[in-house]
Amino acid sequence: MSRTSAIETANEAWDAAPDWVMALAQTCDDQESQHQTAKRVGISATAVNQILKNKYPGNLPNVEKKVRASLMTDKVNCPVLGEIGSSQCLDNQGRPFSAASSLKVQLWKACQKCEQNLNRKE
């Protein structure tokens, strides 16, 4: 019995699936696993399944940023480092405060108020 491809699932569920949803679907098909794709993106396999079926109840913009960062190699302008990959940006956002170097302090301070930060306090 053959399984339905993730691309077919997304195309059936979305009127016009966004490019990032199609990148997620393509990666699922390439990996042959929603679980492996979810690990790569940093979300749950359940979230991947719900997104492909256009039934995800969570914060789609945050998931979109994670997909773009991990699968689509988007670039962002960091106020401290200049143009960097989105995955590096997400990595910096998740780091706790460290006074080990002046650069780490600058990054932490900049991340706290940056619009790219998925965990930013309004």
Image (cartoon, rainbow, N blue to C red):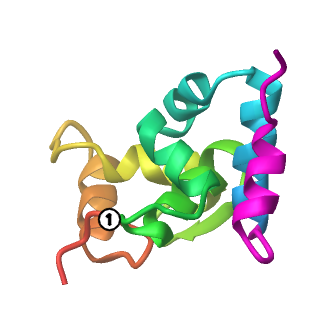
User: Which of 73 and 27 lies nearest the eye of the viewer?
Assistant: 27
**Compared to 53, does 37 lie above or below?**
above
Q: Is residue 105 left or right of residue 52?
A: left
Residue 14 among magenta residues: yes
**Residue type indicated by callout 1:** Cys
Q: Is residue 2 left or right of residue 90?
A: right
Location of the N terminus by quadrant is top right
User: Would you say residue 19 is visible in this rendering?
Assistant: yes
**Residue at (70%, 63%) from the top-left corner?**
13
**Compared to 51, does 39 lie above or below?**
above
Residue 51 among magenta residues: no
User: Which of 99 and 9 lies nearest the eye of the viewer?
Assistant: 9
Count of marks placed on residues: 1
Which residue is label 1 attached to? 111
Q: Is residue 86 left or right of residue 92?
A: right
Q: Residue furthest top?
A: 1
**Compared to 67, does 12 lie above or below?**
below
**Residue at (82%, 27%) from the top-left corner?**
30
